[in-house]
Amino acid sequence: MSQTAYRTHHATEVTEKLVGQRVTLAGWVDRRRDHGGVAFIDLRDATGLVQIVIYDEEVARPLRSEFVVQVVGEVRERPEGNENEHLVTGKVEVVVESLTVLAKSDALPFQVSTALENEAENKLPGEDVRLKYRYLDLRRPAMQRNLKLRSDMTRAARHALEEMDFTEVETPTFIKSTPEGARDFVVPARLVPGSWYALPQSPQLLKQLLMVGGVERYYQLARCYRDEDFRADRQPEFTQLDIEMSYVGQEDVMAMAEKVIAAIWKTQGYDIKLPIDRITWQDAMDKYGSDKPDLRFGNPIVELTDYFKNTPFRVFQAPYVGAVVFPDGADTPRRQFDGWQEWARQRGAKGLAYVQFSGDGELKGPVAKNLSDEERAGLKQAVGAKDGDAVFFAAGAREPSQLLLGAARVEIARRAGLLDPKKFAFTWVVDFPLFKRTDDPDDDDVAVGHSKWTSMHHPFTMPSADWIDKFDKDPEHAMSDSYDIVCNGEEMGGGSVRIHRNDIQERVLDVLGIGPDEANEKFGFLLEAFKYGAPPHAGIALGWDRTVSILAGEDSIRDVIAFPKAGGGRDPLTGAPAPISDEQRAETGVDYDPDEE
Amino acid sequence: MSQTAYRTHHATEVTEKLVGQRVTLAGWVDRRRDHGGVAFIDLRDATGLVQIVIYDEEVARPLRSEFVVQVVGEVRERPEGNENEHLVTGKVEVVVESLTVLAKSDALPFQVSTALENEAENKLPGEDVRLKYRYLDLRRPAMQRNLKLRSDMTRAARHALEEMDFTEVETPTFIKSTPEGARDFVVPARLVPGSWYALPQSPQLLKQLLMVGGVERYYQLARCYRDEDFRADRQPEFTQLDIEMSYVGQEDVMAMAEKVIAAIWKTQGYDIKLPIDRITWQDAMDKYGSDKPDLRFGNPIVELTDYFKNTPFRVFQAPYVGAVVFPDGADTPRRQFDGWQEWARQRGAKGLAYVQFSGDGELKGPVAKNLSDEERAGLKQAVGAKDGDAVFFAAGAREPSQLLLGAARVEIARRAGLLDPKKFAFTWVVDFPLFKRTDDPDDDDVAVGHSKWTSMHHPFTMPSADWIDKFDKDPEHAMSDSYDIVCNGEEMGGGSVRIHRNDIQERVLDVLGIGPDEANEKFGFLLEAFKYGAPPHAGIALGWDRTVSILAGEDSIRDVIAFPKAGGGRDPLTGAPAPISDEQRAETGVDYDPDEE
C-alpha cells in the first residue's frame, strides 16, 4: 500500500531498481545543499531519506526545512563519487520535474533533521520545550524508532499470548474506588450528582471477576491511573500488560510470562535464555540491597555483623553491619569520598563509612583507626577485597543499611560504566513476605487498612501453602505466592497467586485492619463473587512503559510515550490541566447539595 | 499449555483418543443427574463439557451446581446407547478416582448451565440482576461466545492493520477539553488545584498531531468518553478502532478500511464482496430517510412532492411529500393503524397518513377521500404499490418527513421479519454536507461554536476540493470529504479527510462562530502545529462496541462489553458511581479557592 493519492513510492523504495522510472514522492524537506544553482534536497518520509535534485531555481528558492512537498521526477543513478553508502537510496537520486508545496513551515524551535541526528541529540532543548512541540520532537529519528519499537513489542506480546489461547478483554475505566496502595483519580458523575467514579489503579479486581466469570485466560494492555506525587519517572496514567489465568499456580504464570518476554526481546534480535534465573526476596535484599537487583554485574554486599560482633567501634555495634567493595577505589581523591557522603545523606543516611586498601597493604580511611588490630587484619579477606580497593560500610537496622549498600553498589557500577543498556540481566524475585510494616519510612505506598501491617503486593495475594493456616498468627514471617520480574535493576512487573476463597480473604483483611463492614463497603462485590464458585487463579502485570524503555535503552519512560506529562502532571503541549467554566463545573454535580433539592 | 498445576487436559480434549488414560480435569459442576446411586456430572471449563462419573456416593453427595472441582480419573467409552452426539466429548466419560472441591457455591440467583442454554435465555432475569452478578452472567455460553468473538475480531483487525504497516500508538486519557459535540468527563488535577483534565471524546486531535509528528500510519483501539444522557444504547465510555494516515485521500482510507472490515467478518466465515457499495448522503436521505440506511431490504421512499403539487388536500400542500409502501398492509386492522399513529407521535410527528389499496382495486383509508380523482387514479403507479398494499405518507419539511418515512420503512421490515441478523448489508455513505444547522431539532449534538452552523462531522473535516475556495460563502451547500460506513442500518464508523492548513481551518472555525481568540484557547496547539509543515492526512474510526454487536447479532452493545454500565451510568455490580470521603474530596482540589491561599 505504498501507492496512495499523494505518492507512488516511499522514499526508501527508490533504489537502483527504479532507475529510469518516473516516481511521485511526498515528504518533508530534511536538509538542503545548493551547488552551482542546483538544489540537492534530502526528502524524508516515515521510511527514511531519498535525494531529490531541483535544477529550476524558481522552484527551489522558497523551499525551507520541514516544508511538506510532493515531487514528480525520474530516478537516475548518482554521478560517480556522489554515492552515499549510509543510505539505502544512496546510489540514486530523483530529478524533479514538478513540485507541489503541500504545506509550509515556519522556522523550527529546534532541529529535527535526520542528517543531523548525532549532533542533534546534543542540541536538544529542555524537556518542556520538547514536550510543547512534541509533534516536532516525534519527527526525530530516535523518537520515531521508539514509537516503532513500542508498537513492535506490543505486537510480539499479543501474538505470543494469542498462541497461548488468551482472550483479550477490555475492562472499564469508570469503576468504584478500590484499595491498592495509591490515591485514586476520581471523575464526577453528572447523572448521579454528588457521586464519583474512580479510575482504576489496575484492573486487579475486574480481572479476578473475569476468572470467576469463566474467562480462563485473560489479557489486556490496560491503561491505569495513580494520583501520586510525580517524583522521578512516574506518570499519572500508565500502561500495563495485564494477564490473569485460572486453574494455574505460580510456575504456570512464570512459564507463560517468560515466553512473552522472550518474544518481545526477540523483536530486537535478543535470545533470552529460558528459564530465567530466580532469587528469593531475602537473598536479593541480603546480597544486593534491593528487591529489584541489577545483575548485569556482580559485587554483592557482604554481611559483617558477625565479623564485628566484638568490635570496639561504637558505630559497628549495630544489629546489622554490611559492606560493599568499591573496586580500585583506594586512590579516589578525598573530595570524591566527601561527595559519596553527600550522596548517602541525600538518601537519608548519616554518611557512608569507608576504608581504603592501599597498594602497599596499609588500611586507610576514617574508619580504619577505630577497628581492632584483628579486625583490620582479616577485613580484606572477609569482604573479598584486593589491594587498591576501597570498601563502603553501612551499620544500623538491617533493611535501611542494605538498601544504602545496594544503592552504593549500583552507583559504583554506574561510575565504572558497567551499566550497559544493551545487556539485559533478567531475574525473578520470589518468596516475598505476605505483609510489611506500615511504619516503614522508605515506603511511600498508602496503607490499605488500619493495622501495623499492610500488604507487600496487594490484599488479594495468596499466602504460600505453608502459611495458609497460620499467616494471621505470625504476620511478620508469613510468606506469599508472589513474584516479580526484574531486568537491569528495574521492576518490569510482578504478580501473584490470588486468594479465591472468602475465608482466607477475610483473614487477610483482618490482619490489615479492615473489618467486615469496611470490606463489604469497599469490595463487597468481590467477596460476593467468591460465594459462587471461584476457580483458583493467578496472574501478572508488566509495566509496559518501563518494559519498553528498558529494551529501548532509554532512561526515561517519557521517551517511549507519545504524549507524556511533564512534572506535576502538566502537559506543555495542550496546557492541560486547565480550569473549567462555571457552566461545566455546575454540570459535573460536584457542588451538589442534597439539602438544597 | 493445557497442562497446568490443576489439570492435564481441558474438557473438550477428552475424546476417544484418550480412552484408557488417566486425566486430571478442573472446572464447574454444570449439571448433575443421578441414576442408581451413580452421579453423572457435566464438568464445564472454558472449552466446553465432559461427563464425569462418580460411583462413590459420599464423594458425590455434597456437589452442587457451580462448585469448582478437580477430578482425577480414567477415560472410558460410554456404554452403547449413552453417547451424546452434540458434544465433542460425547463418546467418552471420565470415571472419577479422586475429587477435590476447590470452591463451593451458594445457590445461584439465576441459572448459567450450558445444558440449559436454550431455555436459560428465556429464564434470564432483568438486566440489572444480570449486571449485578455479571461474573455469573459471563459464564453463560452466549456471553462466553460474545467475549471470544470480540477478542477474535480485535485480533483480526490488528493483524490486517499490521500487514498494512500501521504503528499502534497509545494516546493519553488525560487531555485538554476539545470541542467535539458532546460533554466532556473531567478529572480534578490534585497537583494543580482548581484545574481539571478532560477525558477524550476521541483521540481526534492527538492522532492529527501524530501525523504532524511523522507517524504516517497510526492505529489504536482507543477508549473514548462522552458525558451524554444515556438514552438508548449508549455507554459513558466506549471503544473505537481509531485509524489515521498521512499522504492519503478518501479513496485510500476507504480501501484500507474495507480490508479491515473484510478481515473481521472473515473470522466468522463471511466473505464480504469488495469494494463495498456507495450511496451519497443525499440519496440515502431521499431514498431511505436515513444517513445510515438499512439495505438488507429494498422498499425505498418515493417522493411525491411533484405528484401532489396541485393537490386539494391541505396537508399535502407542503414543501415535501413522500411515501413508503407497506407491502400487503391493506388488510391491516384499524387498531393496528391506530398503533402506527401512536408510533409516529412518539417520534414527534403529528401522525402517519395512509391509504389502502384493497384487493378489489378500491382506495381506502382516511387520506383517500381528500385526494382528487386524478391523484387517486395514478397513485398506485406513482408509489409503485400493488393491490393489497398500504402506503404511508409524510408531508412537511423535507428532512423530518424523510426521517419519519425512513423509520416507518425499517419498522415495516422489522414487523415483516426482514431484519435477518445473519445477513450483512454494507454501504459507504459519501458526499456529506460540511455543515448543518444548529437549530436542527432532531439532533442532540452540542454545537461547537456560536453561529447557526455547526459541523456535520467535526470542525477538522476538509471541504471537498470544489468547495475549498467558497465553502464559507455558501455554508448551506458546501460539501466535505467525509464518509460513513454503515451496516444493517447502524453506523459502524466514519471518517474524513482532515484540514492540514491553518488558512482553511481558520475559515471553517469562522463559519462555526469560533473566533481566533477562542480557537487559540481551545486548540491553539493544533493551529500551532500546522505552522510547521503538516502533511495531508485522513482517517476513520470504527465504533468497536457497535461493530462487535452487529457481527454478534446482538441488539445491545451491553451484550458485547464485559462490564457495561446500566442506565444513568450506574454499575449494579460495584455500586459505582459513589460518594467520596471528605478527605478524598479535599485532596482533589475541587474546592480550591485561590483567594484563601
Image: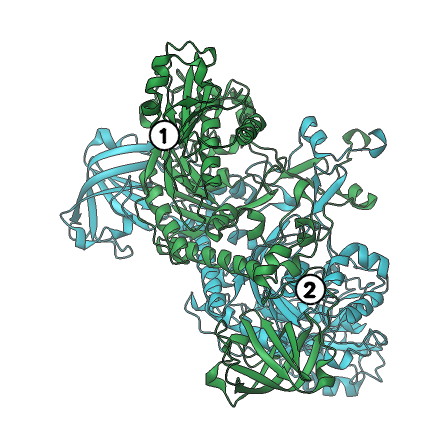
Chain colours: A cyan, B green
Q: Indicate the chain on which mark 1 is placed.
A: B
Which residue corresponds to the image point at 82% horizontal and 73% vertical from the top-left?
Answer: A475
Camera-near label (1 vs 2) is 1
Residue designated by label 2: A340
Residue A495 is labelled as none
Tell me if residue A473 comes above or below residue A8 in the rendering.
below
Label 2 Cα neighbours within 10 Å, binned few <14 / some 14-19 / many ≥20: some
Q: How many marks?
A: 2
Q: CA distance from mark 1 to mark 2?
A: 100 Å
Residue A241 appearing in the image: no
Mark 1 and mark 2 residues within 8 Å of each other at the beta carbon: no
- Tag 1 and tag 2 share a subunit: no
On what subunit does the disc labeled 2 rest? A
SS class, disc 1: loop
Residue at 36% across, 33% down: B430
Residue A241, image x, y percentages: 56, 61
Q: Nearer the viewer, residue A193 or B78?
A: B78
Image-based side of A413 in relation to A198, left or right: left
Residue B438 point in image, percent of width and height? 52, 21
B32 with respect to B349 (left or right): right
Q: Secondary structure at mark 2?
A: helix
Q: Amino acid at mark 1?
A: Asp
In the displayed structure, does residue A313 sit left or right of residue A170? right
Q: Nearer the viewer, residue B380 or A274?
A: B380
Query: Quadrant location of the C terminus of chain A?
Result: top right
**Position of residue A253 measured from the top left corner of the image (x, y, whole percent):** 59, 73
Q: Is residue A16 among what the camera can see?
A: yes
User: For residue B387, which numbered disc appears in the image?
Assistant: 1
Q: Position of residue A324 (x, y in %)?
A: 68, 75
Q: Residue furthest bottom?
A: B20
> Which residue is at the front of the view, B41 or A297?
B41
